[in-house]
Amino acid sequence: MHRARCAEHNYWKGKSEDSFRKDRQLIVDFLVSASGGPAFYGGRDMKTSHAGLGITEREWQLFMEHSRAMLMHLQVAPREQDEVLDFLTGLKADVVQPQVAPIGVA
């Protein structure tokens, strides 16, 4: 889990507390809206939001491990944990970007 925290720390590094709060609220609004709740999500779609970030399969796996651990920490029931993780898995294609091998590397 420590590596997941390090990867997330790199993302948030250099962000002000205000920017962090705004980003957090966008995440909350997205999750509530996407799950049929009453929140209005005014952010960009996931593909646009993550384009150019170069998020790797390994980083995605760390995110999923962290998400699973947080759901367990919050004592979310197993059925609801599965629903949240399935929802997140559905976003993977828009978040993880194919990695291009450097020229000359097989």
Image (cartoon, rainbow, N blue to C red):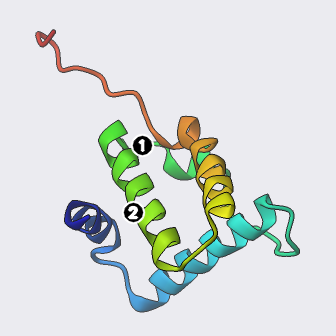
Q: Vertical placement of 61 versus 42: above or below?
A: above
Q: Do the residues labelled 1 and 2 touch (CB within 8 Å)?
A: no
User: Which residue matches tag 1?
Assistant: 52
User: Taking 84 as reference, is 66 left or right?
Assistant: left
x%, y% of residue 7?
27, 61
Which quarter shows the C terminus?
Answer: top left
**Nearest the eye: 53 or 29:** 29
Q: Is label 1 in a helix, a strand or a loop?
A: loop
Front residue of 6 and 71 = 71
Q: Marks 1 and 2: which is nearer the front?
A: 2
Check disc 2 and report its element: helix, strand or loop. Answer: helix
**35 to the left or right of 45:** right
Where does the image place residue 30, in percent across and percent down from the top left?
70, 65
Residue with the most extreme left position: 104
User: Is residue 20 toward the left or the right of residue 37 in the image?
Assistant: left
**For the residue carrying disc 2, how many other residues have a C-alpha within 10 Å: few (<14), some (14-19), or many (20+)?**
some
Q: Distance between the residues labelled 1 and 2?
A: 23 Å
Give the position of the N terminus as an image quadrant: bottom left
Residue at 28% over, 74% down: 13
Q: What residue type is labelled 1?
A: Gly
Q: Name the residue under label 2.
A: 66
Q: Which amino acid does label 2 sit on?
A: His
